[in-house]
Each structure stands twice: as C-alpha cells, then as structure tokens.
Image: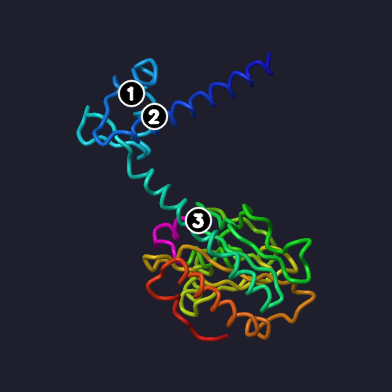
Amino acid sequence: MSQDRNNSSIYDTSRTADRVLDIFEYLEGFDAPRTVTQIAEQLSLPKATAFRLVTALRERGYLAQDRPRGGYRLGARLLRLAVGARRQIGVARAAPPILRRLAQETGESCQVSVREGGYALCVAREAAPDQKQWSLTGDVGTIFPLHATAVGKILLAHVPDADRRAYLAAPLAVSTPHTVTGPESLEAILRQVRERGYARDDEEFRVGLCAVAAPVCGADGGVVGAVGVTLLRQSKLAGDKTVARIVPALLEAARELSAELGAPTAPPERNRP
C-alpha cells in the first residue's frame, strides 16, 4: 500500500511539472496575454486546475498579469532564469582553454564557478598536469559553500548587500576547524576580498587544501563567476609564498576570461600579495 502511495505521489508530481511546462510553452507563442479559459481549453485542463497553476506561477513571478482579472503572460522571473542560464553557459564555454593554460602555468588544479543560490557551482575544471586522474576541485556540477571557499568568497563579496547580509545571518556550515562563520568576521574578510581583488581559502573547506580565486566579469561589468586555483597544503609551499607564486597567473586568467565574456573593463588589478 505504501509503495502504491509513493508511486501515485511521483506520478502526480510529474503530471504537475508537465502541466507547468505546457503552460510556459503555450504562452511563449503569444505576445498578447491569454485567459485562464484559453489556457485550460488549449491544454485540455479543468479550468479549476488551470486557475490554480497560473495563480501559483503568478505569485512566484513566473507569470504576470497586466491588470487584475486580466490574461496571463510570461513573467520577469523566467527572464532572470534565462539570463542566469546564459551566463553559466557562456562562462562554461569560454573557460576550458584558459583553465588549461592556468593549470600548465601554475602546475595546480583549477576551476571556474558561478553562484547558484547559496552555493558556488563548478561549471568548468582542469586537473593539475601531473594529477590527471583525479581533481582537487571536484567535478563539474559540484557545489561549494560561499563562505568557506575562495571561489565562494569572490561570489559572496559581490552580491547585493541585502543578499549578502541575509546569507551571513543564516546558520553557516562548519566544514573544518578553520571555517569562519561569524557574520562580522566574514564581512571583514569579504571587504578585504573586494579591496585586494582576490580571495583565499586556507583549509576552511577541506583540511589539507588551500585555494585562491579571482573575479570574472560579464558584459555589464558585474561579477558573474570566479576562477580558482586549488592545491594540497601538505605537499606545497604554503602561505604568502604560494599566493605570490599563483596570483599573477590567476589574475591574468580572470582578466582573459572576462574579456572573452565581453566585459567592458577587465577586473581591476589590485595590490599584489
């Protein structure tokens, strides 16, 4: 009986998702708003079901009405999703040759990540030249906490102030004894990230791993991603000497990737370590 209920729940969820996508695809073909009656008739839905779905989508911003009781059209929230998808695809397409050169120059693993909600999402990666069978950066699709990684700090440092405060006010995961979670301490770290133009992670996400990252800008000049270099602390020179060795190549890679994305100006070159 329990299995039957589970199967029924999965079916109902899938059917609802199909109906939502049908609504989007139907409205995509019209410039003028469409009424609930038109939507229901076109998609062979009960009118009450169509009304429930479009109401929920309107409340979330995925559909819009020009006037009360008027017809429905695609909403601005969908445009935001499209812009985000285009940004991620653009970064992922442009990154591979630049990451390969960066890995060769530094001898380290490297990646490019973009912000996905409260996480940094890896969209491109390149293993260290002598470590092709495994990666310190995780596979494409891996997510990382914003507050505990170098790429995450770059992204968090450049979100709108209200979004950053909301993130820092929430409970933050402690990954290692070195993870910083205090809002005031993190605000100071993020302010320093913006001032110097790169971020550091010293075993804050994984014991034994360190990283540095720099911002990648898009066509509007805003930060759309972060390029990072990761290394094993126990097998590499740690601290300022390592940062000094890696950061010049990292900043150049970030500027090159920004230029590929059409940034009006490359990320500003800050103080060297």
Do residues under tags 2 and 3 come within 8 Å of each other at their CB atoms? no
Quadrant into which the C terminus falls: bottom right
For the record, the magenta segment spans 158-167
Residue at image position (79%, 76%) is 235
Magenta span includes 159:
yes
Answer with left or right where residue 258 lies relative to residue 62: right
In the picture of the structure, the residue carrying the numbered disc 3 is 88
Q: Nearer the viewer, residue 193 or 260?
A: 260
Q: Earlier in the sequence, mark 1 or mark 3?
A: 1
Kindly indicate the quadrant of the structure image that contains residue 73.
Answer: top left
* Callout 1 amino acid: Ile
Residue placed furthest toward the left = 67
Disc 2 element: helix
Disc 1 element: helix
In the picture of the structure, the residue carrying the numbered disc 1 is 39
Residue 222 in the image: state x and y as whole percent: 40, 66
Residue at image position (56%, 63%) is 152
How far apart are the two marked residues, 2 and 3, measured between alpha carbons? 25 Å
Residue count near mark 1 (Cα–Cα under 10 Å), binned few <14, some 14–19, many ≥20: many
In the picture of the structure, the residue carrying the numbered disc 2 is 23
Answer with left or right where residue 107 lies relative to residue 193: right
How far apart are the two marked residues, 1 and 3, measured between alpha carbons? 32 Å
Q: Above or below — where is 237 with respect to 258?
A: below
Magenta span includes 57:
no
Residue at image position (44%, 31%) is 21
Q: Earlier in the sequence, mark 1 or mark 2?
A: 2
